[in-house]
Image (cartoon, rainbow, N blue to C red):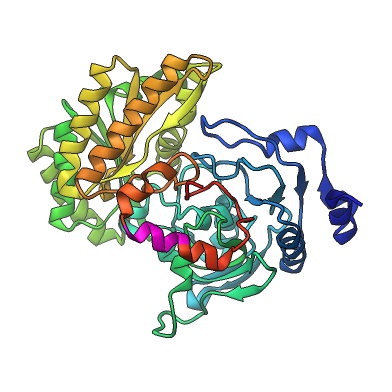
Amino acid sequence: MNYIEHLQNLLSHEQVTTNDVLREQHGRDESYHEPHLPDVVVFPKSAEEVSAVLAFANEQLIPVVPFGLGTSLEGHVIPTKGGISLDLSLMNAVLEVRSEDFLVKVQPGVTRSQLNKELKKYGMFFSVDPGADATLGGMAATNASGTTSVRYGIMRDQVRDLEVVLANGDIIHTGGLAAKSSSGYHLNGLMIGSEGTLGVITELTLRVYGIPEKIVAGRATFNTVQEAVNSVVALKQAGIPMARIELVDKTSIKQVNHASGASFIEMPTLFLEFHGNESGLQSDVVFATELLNDNGCTGLSFEQDERARNQLWELRHNLAYTYIHSAPGKRLMSTDVVVPINSLPEAIENSRKKIESMNINAGIVGHVGDGNYHILLMVDMNDPHDILKAKELNEHVVEFALSLGGTCTGEHGVGSGKAKYQRLEHGLAYDWMKQIKQVFDPNNIMNPGKIFID
């Protein structure tokens, strides 16, 4: 009996497939990285089934790669060593809403929009907003963040407890329901961002928030990116509790107008959002307006209507897809670095100069309220010269960010694309990370080839 037949007997024939179309779907993500097909796709329905699959895979030395929706951007879910693609989409239940504790318990296949639809009944929302409608398990695995992280924090800040199945089949919990604890090692922090290299997340207990009484969104335009970024620094230094501060440069605004039919002024633009109560929020908006004008803002408009606000953020979230649709046949590369806030103007200016010196058509966007920015460019994967240019740009941006005390990835994760920068960023700590991996996964079956260079 081959191992695929054994998996079918272990679960059911319907949950284990070698269908070519499904294997192809699970052999890629939304990145430019080279696809690679798994041997088989498995659809577990419970933590116990995940445990059975992992225990068998560990015994037989079969690679296992957890899969959510495939929205990752650094090759995380690509099974570069073959083996099992473990699709968690059937584990998609909102298990419990503890509204008085501001907590919710979910399975890993629940998507961000699915959860927020359920939470709206309770007057609450889940804050992490990466743009893509990713699964919560995948968001925890990559320590995702997004547009609202400047106010509410990143994925690691929202997780109270995880149920994780380890490589040998053991099922553990990494936290609890309490708001704080001094008991033992911080296993939540270890598992979040581990990208399926230490275990498979099968349940999450997450922190949620009350929907703000009042929300105002706005757009501020500037003559230069430098002025826009200076404004971000000024807003942060003033202590205004911004919910979102997003930079979209001139090139990207042109893409938005072309793709959506919008008529935004084609200048560097900050997309802003304020959350609060009626009186406090109006005071924040007035103060922010003064600071923006002092830093060279040439145009400012606000939206309080929910539909208009949603349209504004939909355009921002879909920006990556406007680049994709603008260049059929090419693949999107999105760089992803974070630098200290006071270094942000210097970093973005350095990136823009590099883009222009290389004669590359690329836009700069980002969650600049926490120092995170991206360069979006389309790459012809059939043109070796185009690939080399894209990689040269990415390497330059990463190395410059690291020289400023930043990081090679703020929210996309390491995957295979950023693995080569880990030693440069972490130094000796990288060796200790590898030892942790060895303890949890001695046979290296869990998403091999990711984070660590073999």
What's the magenta region? Answer: 428-434
Q: Position of residue 160 (x, y in %)?
A: 48, 72
Rendering quarter of residue 376: top left
- Of 12 and 128, which appears nearest the observer? 12
- Residue at image coords 68%, 61%: 93
Side of 412 relative to 301 (left or right): right
- Of 436 and 364, which appears nearest the observer? 436
Which secondary structure type mostly characterizes the magenta part of the structure? helix
Asked whether 430 falls inside the magenta stretch, the response is yes
Q: Is residue 247 visible?
A: no
Side of 57 relative to 303 (left or right): right
Q: Position of residue 319 (x, y in %)?
A: 43, 30
Asked whether 379 falls inside the magenta stretch, the response is no
Rendering quarter of residue 155: bottom left
Side of 304 relative to 340 (left or right): right
- Of 153 and 266, which appears nearest the observer? 153
| Residue extending farthest bottom | 183
- Residue at image coords 38%, 57%: 430
Side of 21 relative to 245 (left or right): right
Q: Position of residue 57 (x, y in %)?
A: 74, 58
- Of 257 and 286, which appears nearest the observer? 257
Rendering quarter of residue 149: bottom left
Q: Position of residue 86 (x, y in %)?
A: 70, 52
- Residue at image coords 18%, 31%: 349
- Compared to 149, does 105 lie above or below? below
Q: Is residue 330 visible?
A: yes
